Amino acid sequence: PDGTQLVVAAGLHVLVYDASDGTIIQPLKGHKDVVYCVAYAKDGKRFASGSADKSIIIWTSKLEGILKYTHYDSIQCVAYNPVTHQLASCSSGDFGLWSPEQKSVNKHKVSSKITCCGWTNDGQYLALGMMNGVVSIRNKNGEEKVKIDRSGSSAAPVWSIAWNPSKDEQHDVLAVADWGQKLSFYQLSGKQIGKDRTLSYDPCCVSYFSKGEYIVMGGSDKQASLYTKDGVRLGVIGEQNSRVCACRVKPDSNFMVMGCQDGTIACYQLNFSTVHGLYKDRYAYRDNMTDVIVQHLITEGKVRIKCGELVKKIAIYKNRLAIQLPEKIIIYELFSDDASDMRYRIKEKILKKFECNLLVVCSNHIVLCQEKRLQCLSFASVKEKEWLMESLIRYIKVIGGPPGREGLLVGLKNGAILKIFVDNPFPITLLKLSTSVRCLDMSASRKKLAVVDEHNTLLVYDIISKELLFQEPNANSVAWNTQCEAMLCFSGNGYLNIKASNFPVHQQKMQGFMVGFNGSKIFCLHVYSMSAVEVPQSAPMYQYLERKLFKEAHQIACLGVTDSDWRDLATEALEGLDFDIAKKAFIRIQDLRYLELIDSIEARKKRGENDNDLFLADIYAYQGKFHEAAKLYKRTGQEPKALGMYTDLRMFDYAKVIRSAVETAFTPTRRIKEPQAAAEMYISAGENLKAIDVLGEHGWADMLIDLARKLDKAEREPLAKCASYFKKLKHHGYASETYSKMGDLRALVRLHVETQHWDEAFSLAEKHPQFKNDVFVPYAQWLAENDRFEEAQKAFHKAGRQNEAVRVLEQLTRNAVVERRFDDAGYYYWMLSMQCLDIARDQRDEMLTKFEHFQTLAELYHVYHPIQRYTDEPFSSLMPESLFNICRFLLSNLPKDKPPPGIFKVNTLYALAKQSRKLGAYKLARLCYEKLQKLHIPSRFQECIELDSLTIRAKPFHDSEVALMCYRCSNKPLLNNQGTACLNCKQPFIYSASSYEVLPLVQFYLEDGVGDEEAVSLIDLEVPHAERTDAPWQHLDNDAQVLKMDDGLEDAEEDPFAPKMIFEQGGSHFVPVKVNRSVLRSMSRRDVLIKRWPAPLKWEYFRSLLPDVSITMCPTCFKMFHSEDYELLLLQHNRCPFCRRPIDEPN
């Protein structure tokens, strides 16, 4: 069991060999016939031999026979219990159990010849293999517990069995080899594991490795073969001239001994080479000879890929994994581009057998290395390139590149180093060494090449100049840091060596073989396991700091150093005045105090300061190096700073020394024109006003605000002087801060207004309404000066300057009329009217008159705008009916004496004549042309009007149905001299403000004593109407039906509003419709529209006489529209067409 002795049954003798060198120690004699079997006890104290002479002999480890007992038949096999050292001896007809404590042997009969036996690992059960194909499992007393009857499927003799010695297995596993040329596996319960493995020979022996990971088998094929524990054949260990009868693996080693039928004993050592691949932080390696494990070295994630066959080669690159099996190559790819994804799937299979020394995979190719030859194959197994080298290839590595164009780094035995691109048939020679290449790597920028030769010497070259940069001894592998160009590491003689730039090598102990270097992690292969070792980069960082190379030191620190190292880097960089690196380092350790210092120094540099000694003095003062800081302050002429520093620190003795120097230097300082030093001296002496004058005159706003912040808010004079200087220097923020500190709100408002910071001014006016006039009046004037008149008008109005607001609007209106922007003119007149209505609360009569006048002008200009566009532009988007109604409305409402400026009656009559002709109102058209003849016609219309005046006489002298309709009396006049009222009943027409059709509305008034609020509440009361029977047929009691022939008016419920609309025919005065409470109560809210004018105007009420016609009223200007027209205009312009109220503005 300890592997020192080898016991062999050969002929009549038991031979004992020295396992270390194979010399025979002693032949043992005692049997009279052929010895069939031998077995060693687990404790190594004794072993047993069984012979054809039916006897068992127990021998000590000192080769002395101590006991002999017999069976009735020849002994076939023996086995020691691994725990109790009980010996099981099996013959052709029975088996016996013997232990040193008992005097006799317990024997048990069996039904078939026993060919092999074996104990479980815990020594509780004994398995017997029989000639009839049955496996019987017995307990320690010989009682059968499980019988594995294999006669149904295979009655072949069981010739060898073995229990798996592994302690990691969940169940006891029994390997059974029979002469039906099958290998099977069973649990202790008798349940078979997996399927039978077919063999090509008759097996004679089965032996597990000590850890149970592999099986060795031999038999009639004259070979000893290696299998996995699952029965997958891996290969041949050795081949002899005769049948292999026995094989055993040396305990806890990789040696194997086999004995043959011709008496040959052969010992083999099995070397399991490491099959693996590495790319950056992914490492793939072979496990159990048939599996591949991919390990993420950073996250420690692992995934196992079961191949079911011997894995011969592994290659990994980016998201690709290539595995070579005996008869094929399988290409895998990652499921996603996630850097931590560990899920692989099959991309391609190359079903071809390859013999190669090295395998490389790229994005779209695999590269096979065969001695001197490199072959590049696509994943479809098409050979695309082939390169033949002048010497054996010793090393090959993918160095990256675009997909399909990757580069390979190749090292040859003759010392040549080549770079090959997979899409280029011509290799590029980089270097030619005098010795063989062992290991290669190229830096991230492709500018440096590191080589380890066969003498274990590391050589680093500049690829461009071919110059040898440096060399180091005792190296067996090398790798550049993938994140830092100037750093590499190499291993050898049990040490890890890190070299940065041209600095000396930093060493530390390490077991294993270094294969990669990424940031602060070094990937180390020790025996069969790969691990990522975290290596602090402190040593190379300090090497850079010693040479004041702060940028390079920061790059090293980013790879991974301690917080104390970061602080040292920050301090060194700060003292070296490299503020960029210092800031990054202090940010890393979150030192806000030093970050404030760096910000202040950088701000001073932007102002033009460039005295590095002064900056360094401030730094020393922050670090507590006060005397060094004072010396630098004195050297730079900044004694007041040294004085202030010592005073704050209560170091008065040192302060007195500095004070005396300040007093002697004070007057000369002003005389030699050093105002900054003078100002600081004034401050240190408490002369703040003088210091403010010096700083203000020289425009040093930052120093001035520092002083202002130190002053108490009660010191109003110096603060006011600071603020005045800030205003002169146009530093609004500093001036605002100073006035806020003083609490002088009026000065602050003036500042915001003068500097045109309107948002701050508005905010202040909102919090303090007494400044409203001080803000909005200047703002309105500024808007007017910048041609933003509409906003200026609103600002004047908001400030309560109504006269200015009206004056701005009147100017806007005049400009719009002059520029023929009649739509804008109408809008401005409407704004003027609303302005007047707002003022009318104070000046009632005058402003109400103006309100009505401006409202009329607003509507006239609004209406004239489409007429002007029709006469001046070639196309019009309005329908003829709409244009006809607009012209008719305008002519009916124009003043008789003089039309408003810009509105031409010729244009209106001409447009009306054209539209009347189109609509068949020939009589009206002839009338328009007759009126045009009496007016001064522009030359551009002259010819057209004269021609139309002649042609219209050929048309019938009548009008089609295009007349207006009064919905109160049903009269239909085309034109009248009453303006916009009915000729018959004098009822004013209500027009749609878009198409200017007459709407089915009648205005009504409230009787005396009925208020607006009461009227609205009465209208809102829905009174149920009596159901009306529409059927003319009526049933009588005697079942007769009667048809009543009348108009139904008497039965229908009469509308109380209808009698109110009755008027006296031929009357000369307008009779308004007045309603009382009962009529109001009968109205439906859906049929009533209310113009809710603000005071002092009264509300206006309108009743719809055609409820099915949907009418919409703008809640701002109270103009009425057909609902469909209004919605279309809102979609087109996103606002009301008259008052321009935005669609999303609340009522």
Image (spheres, rainbow, N blue to C red):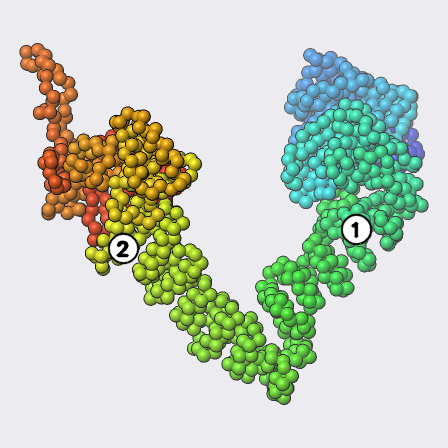
In the depicted structure, whether residue 58 falls above or below residue 202: below
Residue 215 seen: no
Q: Which residue is mark 1?
A: 489
* Mark 2, residue position: 836
Residue type at mark 2 is Cys
User: Whole-Å distance between the Cαs marked 2 and 1?
Assistant: 89 Å
| Res. 105 image quadrant | top right
Q: Residue 45 at x, y = what percent? A: 81, 36
Q: Secondary structure at mark 1?
A: strand
- Residue at screen point 89% across, 39% down: 412
Which mark, residue 1073? none
Q: Earlier in the sequence, mark 2 or mark 1?
A: 1
Numbered disc 2: secondary structure: helix
Residue at 67% x, 71% y: name it: 610
Position of residue 116 in the picture relative to residue 1022 (left or right)? right
Residue at the spot 41% in from the left edge and 63% down from the top edge: 761
Crowd rating for badge 1 (residues with CA inside 10 Å; few <14, some 14–19, many 20+): many
Residue nearer the viewer, 100 or 780:
780
